[in-house]
Image (spheres, grey):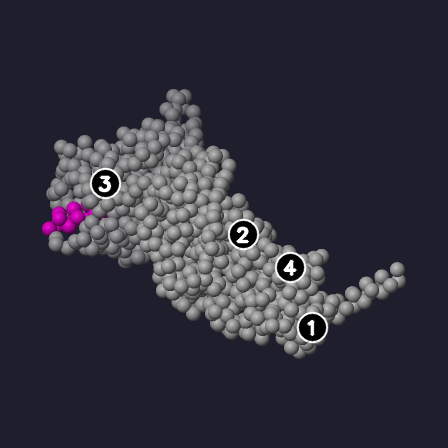
Amino acid sequence: MFAVHLMAFYFTKLKEDQIKKVDRFLYHMRLSDETLVDIMARFQAEMEKGLGKDTNPTASVKMLPTFVRAIPDGSENGGFLSLDLGGSKFRVLKVQVSEEGKQNVQMESQFYPMPNEIIRGNGTELFDYVADCLADFMRTRDLTHKKLPLGFTFSFPCRQTKLEEGFLLSWTKKFKARGVQDTDVVGRLASAMKKHKDLDVDILALVNDTVGTMMTCAYDDPSCEVGVIIGTGTNACYMEDMSNIDLVEGDEGRMCINTEWGAFGDDGALEDIRTEFDRELDLGSLNPGKQLFEKMISGLYMGELVRLILLKMAKVGLLFGGAKSSALHTKGKIETQHVAAMEKYKEGLANTREILVNLGLDPSESDCIAVQHVCTIVSFRSANLCAAALAAILTRLRENKKQARLRTTVGMDGTLYKIHPQYPKRLHKVVRRLVPNCDVRFLLSESGSTKGAAMVTAVASRVQAQRKQIDKVLALFHLTREQLMGVRDKMRTELEYGLKKKTQALATVKMLPTYVYGMPDGTEKGKFLALDLGGTNFRVLLVKIRSGRRSVRMYNKIFAIPLEIMQGTGEELFDHIVQCIADFLDYMGLKGAQLPLGFTFSFPCRQTCIDKGTLVGWTKGFKATDCEGEDVVDMLRDAIKRRNVGYSGECMVDLALFPWALPLLCHTMPRPCDTGLSLPCAPCTLCFQGSCLLPLQEFDLDIVAIVNDTVGTMMTCGYEDPNCEIGLIAGTGSNVCYMEEMRNIELVEGDEGRMCINTEWGAFGDNGCIDDICTQYDKEVDEGSLNSGKQRYEKMTSGMYLGEIVRQILIDLTRQGLLFRGQISERLRTRGIFETKFLSQIESDRLALLQVRRILQQLGLDSTCEDSIVVKEVCGAVSRRAAQLCGAGMAAIVEKRREDQGLEHFKVTVGVDGTLYKLHPHFSRILQETVKDLAPQCDVTFMLSEDGSGKGAALITAVAKRLQQQGKEK
C-alpha cells in the first residue's frame, strides 16, 4: 500500500515538474486576461477600420458585406440545392424545406473528392469539375427536369456586390487554382453549368461557410446572429447595422458581415503576441505573411505548430533525451486530430505515447506528460484568441443595440471545435469571462454550412416573393410625372370652375372670396385680439403691432377643445370659445378692454364681407350641430351676449325711477315685471354721477374680420416678405389661398385690384376626377371618416389621415403574411392608433431601425428588423405621395398666377404653416421638388410661418382697420 502511494506521489511530482518545464519554455504562448482584453480592443479597432469606406483598403480585417439581410423566420418552404466548396471534399446537397405548422427540413447529400490537380490547377477546370458533380447528383436523383434555386457555399474571401455575385480576393486553405482571383465565381460556375444542357438551375446566393453556419443555426434559433467556424480555417460573421456599413448604400436594416478575421494581424497588429514558432510556420506556408491570426488558431496549422515546438524542445535537450526522428523533421506529420487525441481526458497519455512511437520516437513517461502539456498550451491559446475576437463582436452587437445586457446565440461549426475534447468548454468559459454583460448560447451546427447555403437561398427566395407583393402595394402610391401633370391640370380646371358664377355651384374647389383686399404695408399699429380655431386646440392671442416692419409682440394661451364639445351643439362650442377668451383676458388683466378682434376659423366659409362667414361644412373631425349654413361671426357675437347676460354687477337699477334705462337692458336680460321693483342689473352696472346710465360689459370686442388659417399664414409671411401672395397649410388639414385678380372673380362685383381667394382645395376630387390615383386604402379611410365622400384630396395629403392610410396598408400586408408574422394585433385594428407624428419619427434619417422598432412596440406592434424596414417604406410611400399631390396642386396655382399676369417667368413667395410641413423630415423637400418640376417657369420660394395663423388674423384685422380709416378719410 505504501508503495502505491509512493508511486502516485512520484507521478504527480513528475507531472508538475514537466508542466513547469513546458510553461517556462512556452511562456509567451500563455495569454493573461489583461492581454486578451487588449486583443479585444485591437480587433474592435480593426472591425471599425474594415467597415469604413476610406479605411477598408488598408484594413487587415476586411469586414465583407454578404448581402444577406435576413435570417429564416420559419415561413420558408420549397426545394433548394446547395454546393459546398472549401475543403478537401466537395458536397452537393438537396434541401426540402416545408412549413406545415412547424419547421421541417429534409436533406440528401453526396460528397465528391477534390483532387490536388483540381484545386491547384486551372480555374476553368475547377468549375467544370464542380458542374460535373452537380449534374451527376441531379441525374442520379432524377432532378434534371426540375427548376431549382441554388446556394453556393464558397469558403474563401470574396468581395460581393450583391447576393448572387462575388469576386475572389485570395485563395486560402491549400487552394491555388489559377485565373480565378478577381473574377466573379458565380459567373464562372454559371458558365460551367451551361455546358450541361439538362441543368436548369438559378444561382440565387453566394454564401461564405461561416454565413451558412449562422443561417443553419438561425433556422433553429431565431436569436442566432453570429456564426463562427473553427476548423481547417477560422472565420466569423455577424449581423451588422446597415448604418455602420460604409461599403454598401442604404441605412435601413441589417446585413451579415463576413469578417474574414483570419487575416487579423497581417498588418503587424499582433507581432507582440506571435512567437518564433508562429513565424517559422508562416514562412513554410503557401501564403507567407497572410492569414496570421488563422495560423495561430485553426486546425490546418495547429498540429504543425505542435511539431515545430517538439522539434525545438528535442534540439535543446528538453524532450526525448535530445533524440529526433526523421518523422519529427517532416512537415505535416502531426495533425490536429493527433492534438485532439493527446488531450483526451483519460486516454490522453496513452494516445500521446502511441502517436510519438509512430513518429519513430521512444518517449519516457515525463516526455509524454510534457508533449501533452504542449498540446494543451497550443490549443488553449487558440481558444483564447478566438474568444477575444468573438468577445469584440458580441460587444459591438450589444453597443449597436444600446443594451446594458445582450442575449444572443452564436452558431458554431468546424472540425477543431467538434472533435477537440476540451476546446468548446475553454472557448465558452473565456468568452463569458471577457463579456460578463452578454448572455451567450453556443449552438452547434449539426448539418454544416451546406444546409446554411440552402437556407440563405430559401430566405432569398422568400424575401424575393414577399418583395414582389410589397412592391405591388407600394407601386399604387408611386405617381408618375404624367399622373402628377394630370393632377395639376385637373386642379387648374377646378380653380377656373370655382371662380365662375355659372360653374361655381358644381365646382369641388369652391374658391371662396375672403374680402381681404390688401397685404400689410408696415404702417399697421395697435393692440389686437386674435382667435385661432382649426384643430383640437384653440388659441387666444394678444398681438401688439408697432409701426415699422417686424415690430410684433404676441402673448397667447392654448386651450383644449374636448371631443364632446367638437361634436356637441354649436351653442356649446361657441360658449366654450367665449369662456376661453374670458380666461385669457382675465389672465392678461384686460377684462373689459376695448379691442378689435380677428377670428381665424379654419373651415370652409362663404363670405359676403370680411366680418361675415357662413360655414359651408365641418372638416377635421368637427361635427357641432346647428352650425353649417350659419354665420359663425354672429354665433360668436351671440355667445358673447350670453356671457354678458351672465355677468354679475354690484348696483341695483330702479326702473320706476329710471324708465329710460329699460331699452339698454332688454336686449340682454328677461323683460322685467311691471311692479316697479328694483331689479339686479344683469349685464353691468349703469352709472351716471353715482346713478346708473351706461353698461360696463365683461367683453367689449369689435369683431373686425373672420379669417381662414391659410389666409392668416399668407398675411403673416406677407408682413415679412412683400413678395408673398400665396398661403399654404399642410398640417392636420390641407388648404391654399392666394391673391386673385378681381376681374377673374365673378362672384364679387368690381374689377379693380385683387382679393385673397380661399380655395378650400381639400374637396378637390369629390367629383371623382382623381379616382384613377385613389387606392383601396384611401377608400377604406374615407368610408371610416366622419365625412365620407368629402375632402378626398385632403384625405390623401393631410396629417389627419396619412397615419390612418398607413394603418390600413399594414393591416393588408399582415393579412398577406408579409408583416408581424401574419398576426393582426388588437392595437393594429384600432382606428387612429397610427398618428401622423409617428410617420415623421419613423422616417427621420437620424433614427436607427432599433428606435423604429421601439416606436412600433409602443404601438403594441412586435416587429422584426425586416418588419421595421417595410413599415418605414410604407410610411415613405404614403408621405411622398402626399407631398407630390400637394406640389401638383401648388404648381396649378403658381402657373395660373403667371399666366394671369402674362409673364414669361414668375417669382413668388409661398407662406407655409402646418405640422406636416414643419415636422416631417422629407415632406417639404419633395413638395418643393414637385413644384419646380411641374411649373418650371415659376421661381417659387417657400417661407415658413414662424408665428402661425393667429398673428395673421391680427394683421388682417389691422389691415382692415387701416383700409376702413382710409375709406372714411376719402
Tell me the residue that label 4 is attached to: 341
Q: Which mark is residue 968?
A: none
| Image marks 1 and 2: residues in contact by CB distance under 8 Å | no
Residue at disc 2, secondary structure: strand
> Sequence-wise, which precedes: disc 4 or disc 3?
4
- Between disc 3 and disc 1, the foreground one is 1
Q: Is residue 525 above or below residue 603?
A: below
The residue segment tinted magenta is: 889-902
Between 194 and 362, the residue placed more toward the observer is 362
| Residue at the limit of the structure toward the bottom, as seen here | 316
Tell me where residue 566 appears, x and y as whole percent.
39, 33
Tell me the residue that label 1 is attached to: 320
Say whether residue 463 is left or right of residue 769.
Answer: right
Tell me the residue that label 2 is attached to: 411
| Residue at the limit of the structure toward the right, as seen here | 2
Between 274 and 544, the residue placed more toward the observer is 274
Quadrant of residue 384 within the rendered picture:
bottom right
The reply to whether the magenta stretch includes residue 901 is yes
Residue at disc 4, secondary structure: helix
| Image marks 1 and 4: residues in contact by CB distance under 8 Å | no
Between 899 and 118, the residue placed more toward the observer is 118
Question: Where the N terminus falls, by quadrant?
Answer: bottom right
Q: Is residue 950 visible?
A: no
**Residue type, label 1:** Phe
Residue at disc 1, secondary structure: helix
Tell me the residue that label 3 is attached to: 759
Mark 1 nearby-residue class (10 Å; few <14, some 14–19, many ≥20): many
| Residue at the limit of the structure toward the top, as seen here | 674
- Between disc 4 and disc 2, the foreground one is 4
